[in-house]
Amino acid sequence: MSTNKPTLHTCLSPALLNLYDVNNSIVVIIDILRATSTIASALYNGAKCVIPVDSVSRCIEVYGNSPFEYPKEFIENKTLVLTTTNGTRLLQMALDKSAEGIITGAFVNLSSVCDYLVEMNQNVILGCAAWKDRVNMEDTLFAGAVIARIKKQFHINCDSSNMAETLYNDGKKDLFEFMKKNNASHYHRLMGFGLEKDIRYCLTADEANVLPAYRDGKLLVS
Amino acid sequence: MSTNKPTLHTCLSPALLNLYDVNNSIVVIIDILRATSTIASALYNGAKCVIPVDSVSRCIEVYGNSPFEYPKEFIENKTLVLTTTNGTRLLQMALDKSAEGIITGAFVNLSSVCDYLVEMNQNVILGCAAWKDRVNMEDTLFAGAVIARIKKQFHINCDSSNMAETLYNDGKKDLFEFMKKNNASHYHRLMGFGLEKDIRYCLTADEANVLPAYRDGKLLVS
């Protein structure tokens, strides 16, 4: 390698995480629809912290997992316990592999994520939470958005990253239409639940521009 | 599912194969640079059969793995033992999971693969051999090429497939330039070895349009 820049890789599924040098990297957990969008939104609206859990327990009946369920009046100074199977699993894997740092990323906090990664100047793994290990479009698109913005600061020799950036550049003019046109599976699933508003919000940049960082079991504003 | 069409999935890395219902499917092994391109070329030029092996043994010194090493005068009626780590591993995995059928696919035999899949009317897994489990661009592009051609005959609820098709449609006017522009890792590796001619050939449709099918340890023209 003829460069001193840190590396950046995109891991398209938790099942591929073991291919990457996690313990030397900052891992960005990406679960656009909707865990990491909701985490940023809750913290942006003043939640004290978010505790991600993977079991579908009673809390799913009490709290929803739409970013719109956490307006400031409701969430301020509260702790949110969020059930998120895919995101929590990836987070736990990153912890087990002693990641240098763990943050969560979503379109709603895109700028915070990018600014932080550039500032830290360390190796980065963009970790897509995917869906039961199956690669998904929206997490890949977000990885592409980060790469499009910060690639000059990193050494990238990773086809997953190159593909993600290409897809993002293809779709960036209207990500909602891109998801629709290309039959993204979660687009259909959430539209089926009448959640168009959620999808549109989760694909909008910087609506909840904070940086959730993981520490001692909790996600807190960094 | 409101359709009786068979399903089609794209598996972007051997490490993800266990997510799919292999034993009810025809698996297409894809290793564009260069194993499955070479397999089709050798059979097209009259090789009796190709035996894929995964160990890098003496045969790599005797035989090369460029499709140009097997002109008709050399290969006709001979058996080719081809070392291909990534492709062989995926093939073995598909065998272990009792795939309904196993064929190999490459741009050089794109039409044969598509015609066969449509004719069989069974579930399909497009299996990218990748590179040490890391997703690569050229195998994904080939999956996209197949999907672009035959998607109407299949039920596709698979973001990997949707992403592959989008990338292929983006790049199809000039796949070589697309690989170059998007920094595909194997583009750089093979160009570094002076193998531009190999890359261009391996990205060209139907130059060796036969259908290699796996039977009893060998790939034979179906």
Image: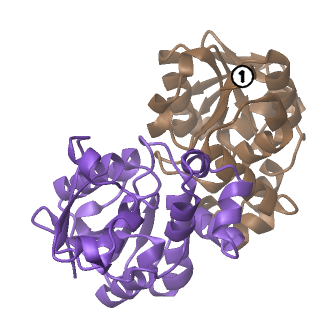
Chain colours: A purple, B brown
B141 or B148, nearer to the observer? B148
Q: What residue appears at the point 88 percent right and 34 percent down from the top-left corner? A: B111
User: How far from the left and from the top, in percent, is residue A34?
Assistant: 42, 58
Asked whether residue B56 is in view, the answer is no
A183, above or below A202, in the image: above
Q: Secondary structure at mark 1?
A: loop
Classify the position of the N terminus of chain B by image quarter.
Answer: top right
Classify the position of the C terminus of chain B by image quarter.
Answer: top right
B96 or B12, nearer to the observer? B12
User: How far from the left and from the top, in percent, is residue A70?
Assistant: 32, 68
Q: What residue appears at the point 58 percent right and 59 percent down from the top-left corner? A: A196
Q: What residue appears at the point 65 percent right and 41 percent down from the top-left corner? A: B31
Asked whether residue A141 is in view, the answer is yes
Q: Residues within 10 Å of mark 1 (few under 14, many from 20)?
A: some
B171, above or below A118, in the image: above
Q: Residue A132: which quarter of the image?
A: top left
Most distant residue in the left direction:
A216
Query: What's the chain of the residue with tag 1?
Result: B
Query: In the image, what residue type sits under mark 1?
Result: Pro
Q: What residue appears at the point 89 percent right and 31 percent down from the top-left corner? A: B73
Residue occupied by mark 1: B6
User: How far from the left and from the top, in percent, is residue A17?
Assistant: 35, 52
